[in-house]
Image (cartoon, helix red, strand yellow):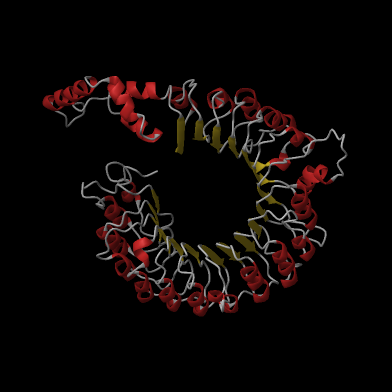
Amino acid sequence: MTSAGEGSGGGKGEAEGGEGEGKRLDRLPEALVCSIMSKLDVGSICSAASTCRAFRASASQIFAFIPSFHLLEIALSIDILRRLLPPNPYLRSLKLDCERLDDSAISLLAQPALQELYVHNCSDFTGKLLCGIASNCADLRCLYLGSVAEKRSRAIHISDLGDLLSCCKQLEALVLMFDVSLISGHDFAPIWASASQKLECLEIGYVSSVMVTELLAPNLAPKSSNSLHPSILPGIQKLILSVDSITDTMVGTISSGLLSLTHLDLRDAPFMEPTIVTDLTNLGLELVNQHGKLKHLSLIRSQQYLITYFRRVNDLGLLMMADKCTNLESISLGGFCRVTDSGFKTILHSCSRLYKLKVCHGTHLTDLVFHDISATSLSLIHVSLRWCYLLTNHAIGNLVSNAQIKVLDLRECKSLGDEALKAIGTLPELKTLRLDGMDISDFGLSSLRERVIKSLTSLSLRGCKRLTDRAISVLFKDASNLELRELDLSNIPSLSDEGILSLARSRVPVSELRIRQCPLIGDTSVMALASMQVDDDQRHGNCLRLLDIYNCGGITQLAYKWLKNPYFPRLR
């Protein structure tokens, strides 16, 4: 560490003052310093350790017995990780960004006492990571592996996954957030027979529908009294899969083969238009929830690679599914282009316990779905209606009869305008509001000021083309005690530095601010945010952890000189 007196501007007295301060800290009992610092998160401990020898010594001791080490904001190098993560018999939970690590870090990550391990961006690792975890972490309960072996020349063999499943017998939750169809070797299905009987949650980043069907097929075979074949994943309650195409066969196998399933989340992204054999039809929906325990259902067709829908499902399919899913508490449906108001209303009227409703690309969903929603017993808390172009302001007026809504997502509902905002402004408990792409004005936003803005923690106005700088003052001028933490003002052509100056003056305590692709935003906005004083202690820019200024037209190199301490001390 360089002392405060070093450098061109430091004097002798200044250096002596810094040295004296260090000596005073050294006089503090080490046990007291360790006790205080141990209550901080890992990032804060590292920051404190950089200030003086006393704190550095205490940090070294803390990292030798700390029970949880969570540091996802920064990707550490192997050299730094060795200093921060010594062998620790008390370490129970480890969460890291491994973007700068490879197989040489396995011994540091796979610590024997771990019960929870969360490592993402593991693209430079090979299957040895799975073997290392299998060899050392027998007590692991929760495991998240992200992007393993995604770099060229890195690979996972089926035996690596087999070792992990057979050795970690205490696993309750397993997330393999990578493409398991690229695992080399055969016998993908048989190795799951040795998986933990305690496994309740399984999530896979990508797997083919054929592999899923083969995996669970043994559960459908007739069982004799002397059968030696164990059930596959008998305790699974929550299954989340991204597949190439959701099919009737896969849905039927899952619904029939997993006896304890309560949460089913399936998403696909076809590369080509599915055929009748490789698609979901009304028959597949009739097979959902064969054991009657399902409470959460999500069936989403993504348009990531191809503009495609569930073209073989209509209102009849939802009617047959609703008959077996009366206990559903949440449902998400995406890409059902042939389902009309009748099908969606069947869900609302059949599932009396529903609190979460998500529909995206509902091309035939209109106001009639919510016409008599006040007559139902529903208590909706989370409503998302993305890309439902036929909805008008009238639908939102009926929807807000559910006054307890906390999350409302109306992104890209382009027929909604200021009248919808007037209805939304009556929701007293709203926490998250997403209005991207709506046809709203500055005046319309004033409907949110009286009640909703005080309860919101997240607000997105991205792509609302009619908004101007005045929208900021309409929402935030003279507002106090706001809970808002996330604000998205991206892609608003008329938003300029003046609007961001108004935001800074209002002292809104946002921790995430997105203003990307605003052509009139420039260096002045960054300087305004740098000088923003949110708290009475006069700390500058002390709340912002994320600032997105991508492709803002007026940003120059000058702005980057402000993106550092002391102006943005928490920026990640």
Asked if 15 appears above or below 347 in the picture, the reply is above
Please tell me in which quadrant of the rendered image residue 284 appears: bottom right
Which residue is at a point 33% across and 20% down the rendered structure image?
A: 57
- Which of these two is toward me, 401 or 207? 401
If the image is split into quadrants, where does the C terminus sit? top left
Give coordinates of residue 277: x percent, y percent.
83, 59
Which residue is at a point 68% across and 27% down the rendered structure image?
A: 167
If the image is split into quadrants, where does the N terminus sit? top left
Give coordinates of residue 156: x percent, y percent.
69, 33
Instruction: Confirm whether residue 55 shows in the render.
Output: no
Instruction: Confirm whether residue 520 shows in the render.
Output: yes
Give coordinates of residue 482: x percent, y percent.
32, 59
Asked if 32 appears above or below 43 in the picture, the reply is above
In this picture, residue 469 sits left or right of residue 385:
left
In this picture, residue 473 sits left or right of residue 403:
left
- Which of these two is toward me, 515 or 446? 446
Give coordinates of residue 375: x percent, y percent.
55, 76
Which residue is at a point 68% across and 49% down the rendered structure image?
A: 261
Which residue is at a point 46% across and 25% down the rendered structure image?
A: 85
Q: Residue furthest front?
A: 225
